[in-house]
Amino acid sequence: MVVWTVANQKGGVGKTTSTISLAGLLAQKGYRVLLVDTDPHASLSYYFGIESEDLDLSVYDLFLQVSTKEQIMQSLCPTHYDNIDILPATMGLATLDRSLGNKGGMGLVLKKAMQKINDEYDYVLIDCPPILGVLMVNALAACERIIVPVQTEFLALKGLDRMMKTLDIMQSEQTQPFKYSIVPTMFDKRTKASLMTYRKLQELYGDAVWPGVIPIDTNFRNASVLQKVPSDYAPNSRGIIAYTNLLKYLIHLKSVGK
């Protein structure tokens, strides 16, 4: 089972869109995909029409008690897409840092839970809140690669700088170095800001930056209104072509051990 975490300490950079787009493409290839929503706003859950506040179980319950494989599987919700399930979020997640932040062993809850269902899915994609706390720590510790979407505008560079500093801080507690890929998003080739930001990303982060870009594409917004994954709604759109190339890149990195 491959676990990817989609994270950045700035909101509005395309984290949830990236998670959903990659999941849709993986599912179309026949892979079994689990989405994990760790954002208290539950945007990923709502995207698939799941009212998480009406559910008996969610990702929140993993932090309240040690769960068996059966309990974890009972917490999952199917989506209207074959091969895509979701572990939904709930507003209760917003209280975790206050109630459990100082409790020992809370940083590996998600990792241990994913290990228990390792044989049920081919890929797990974890969508993160834009705030450093117990949820992001869990998501980073649970994955083998971090996907960092960065909007191609200068204010987004500050959020990326914070994210990189977070990885540096957490690295001291990890036995293996973090693997991460920076993904330029919302790219508009007509604007000088997008072009300059993309060049700055390459200058500052070199090979860690995916050599492609995710362009601005209204099909992402339209797909969300209809609660469809973008690859289903507009399979030939420029945005999905870009995410298809990103997925090929990520799979290639895994195949060569990078």
Image (cartoon, helix red, strand yellow):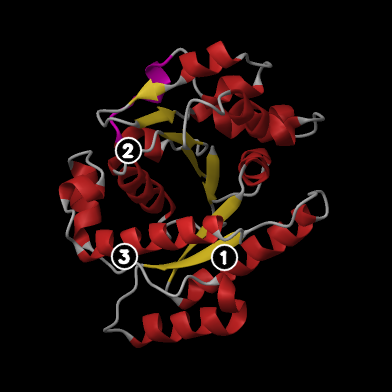
Q: Residues within 10 Å of mark 2 (few under 14, many from 20)?
A: few
Tag 3 near tag 1, CB within 8 Å? no
Where in the figure is residue 218, as x and y percent of width and height? Answer: 20, 60
| Picture quarter with the C terminus | bottom right
Q: Amino acid at mark 1?
A: Gly
Quickly name the residue at label 2.
Answer: 30
Mark 1 vs mark 2: in front: 2
Residue shown at the point (76%, 52%) measured from the top left:
176
The answer to whether residue 216 is above or below residue 92 is: below
Name the foreground residue: 224 vs 110. Answer: 110
Dot 2: element: loop
Quickly name the residue at label 1.
Answer: 159
Q: Is residue 95 visible?
A: yes
Range drawn in magenta: 48-55
Residue shown at the point (39%, 53%) measured from the top left:
18
Residue shown at the point (48%, 35%) measured from the top left:
36
Q: Amino acid at mark 2?
A: Gly
Tag 3 near tag 2, CB within 8 Å? no
Dot 1: element: helix
- Find the distance from the CA under tag 3 to the CA under tag 1: 23 Å
The answer to whether residue 79 is above or below residue 16 is: above
Q: Residues within 10 Å of mark 1 (few under 14, many from 20)?
A: some
User: Sequence-wise, which precedes: disc 3 or disc 2?
Assistant: 2
Q: Amino acid at mark 3?
A: Ala
Mark 3 vs mark 1: in front: 3
